[in-house]
Amino acid sequence: MARKITLDFLKTEAASGAVLGLAALAALIVANSPLSGAYFGWLKSEHVVQVGPLMLQLTVSEWIKEGLMAVFFLVVGLEIKYEILRGELSDPKKLATPVLAAIGGMVAPALVYLAVSGLAGGPHGGWPIPLATDIAFALAVFAVAARNLPSSLRVFLLTLAIVDDLGAIALIAALFSSGVASQPLVWIVGLLLAGGVAARIGKIPAPFWVLGFALVWYLTVLSGLSTSLTAVAFACIVPVDNRRDKQSPLKEAMHDLHPYVAYLVLPLFAFAKAGVSFAGLTLEQAFAPLVIGIALGLFIGKQIGVFGAAWLASALKIGRRPTGASWSELYGVCLLCGVGFTMSLFIGVLAFPGAIDSPQQIEVKLGVLGGSALSAVVGAAVLAIAGRRRKDLADEAADTAQ
């Protein structure tokens, strides 16, 4: 059953990968066309949603980032929980490998960035920017490039990216948070605890799970926390039924939500966040220390940190390689971890506050786009070659057996 669910997810993501790529490409085209004013104006326009006494007023960009992406993180959290309890990550050593790899993938990019900024005289404050992996884009590239490879590699990437993203969120809270409202936070903790207890002592109907998630999400926005953090926390309290013949709320939610996430949430998010204007770009800016530091942190630092930590975990016998995967295939996945994109852009805004078209913001975007694109292209090439080699070996084995 675990393998069937994973294969269903891969099938959906492979089909939606092209949609996600087209959405990002469309955003870049629009942002550099006569329609750029309307595009950026739409993203900044504010809209109010009110249900009884509850009201929120956010921009379109914020509704997509805090609202729709919370559903994405909920689905990702549900899948991680399922894999930990029933699937690939039920072996503690297989869980340890992506967790340790994520830590290595945060330390090495920071060191690479600081080394570049120290040698080239760039600003040291940008070191957190290349630490994050963009889950959505990394998974989309993997789905397209790794069709013939073990699904355990996808689980590795998903787990690593979640730990990586949670680490980035914690970093944002520690370095850039202006304060979190305590009262909504207390309510969030209380609701999560109450939901977890209720799920253990009895069956909760699906509408109550939907209502509970909506309420936790609303309180999260009020508190100032990242909705991705509480979405993953909420996924942790959704129960998995122990009886194999019964569909659990967790599996139902994974099955029902995943197509909407793949075909609606992620393409909308890509269209909203990939729009970067290159108007007025100079050659000096393109090779500024900030640009090079971020790009090399993502492309060089990520692959060294992730692959090095995964290899070390295996060598020390505290972790294991993903089931059925070779080191070359795992290396391709490590390259994809350098796709920083959305979270890196977000951290860049916090690290260098200012106008959207300020010199530092333009350099941040160039570094993130350059490092992410290089990681995606090289990672996809390595995975495609590995997949072709695996397929050829399988065909040879089949011919020999005949």
Image: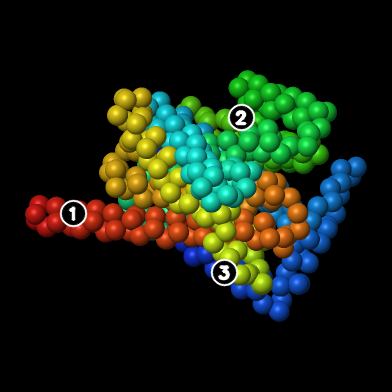
Q: Residues within 10 Å of mark 3 (few under 14, many from 20)?
A: few
Residue at point 10%, 52% (across, down): 401
Image side of residue 71 versus residue 6, left or right: right
**What residue is pinned by disc 3?**
283
Residue at point 23%, 56% (across, down): 389
Q: CA distance from mark 1 to mark 3?
A: 46 Å
- Per the rendering, the mark at residue 380 is none
Q: CA distance from mark 1 to mark 2?
A: 43 Å
**What residue is pinned by disc 2?**
237
Determine contact: label 1, label 3, CB under 8 Å.
no
Sooner in the amino-acid sequence: mark 1 or mark 2: 2
Task: Give the quarter of the image for residue 52.
Answer: top right
Residue at point 45%, 45% (across, down): 301
In this rendering, the count of numbered labels is 3
Q: Secondary structure at mark 1?
A: helix
Q: Is residue 388 above or below residue 155?
A: below
Residue 30 location, x and y as percent? 65, 73
**What residue is pinned by disc 1?**
393
Question: Which quarter of the rendered picture does the N terminus lie within?
Answer: top left
Residue 154 location, x and y as percent? 42, 46
What amino acid type should be assigned to the residue bearing mark 1?
Answer: Leu
Q: Is residue 35 above or below residue 331?
A: below
Residue 347 location, x and y as percent? 65, 47
What amino acid type should be assigned to the residue bearing mark 2?
Answer: Ile
Q: Secondary structure at mark 3?
A: helix
Image side of residue 189 versus residue 367, left or right: right
Determine contact: label 2, label 3, CB under 8 Å.
no
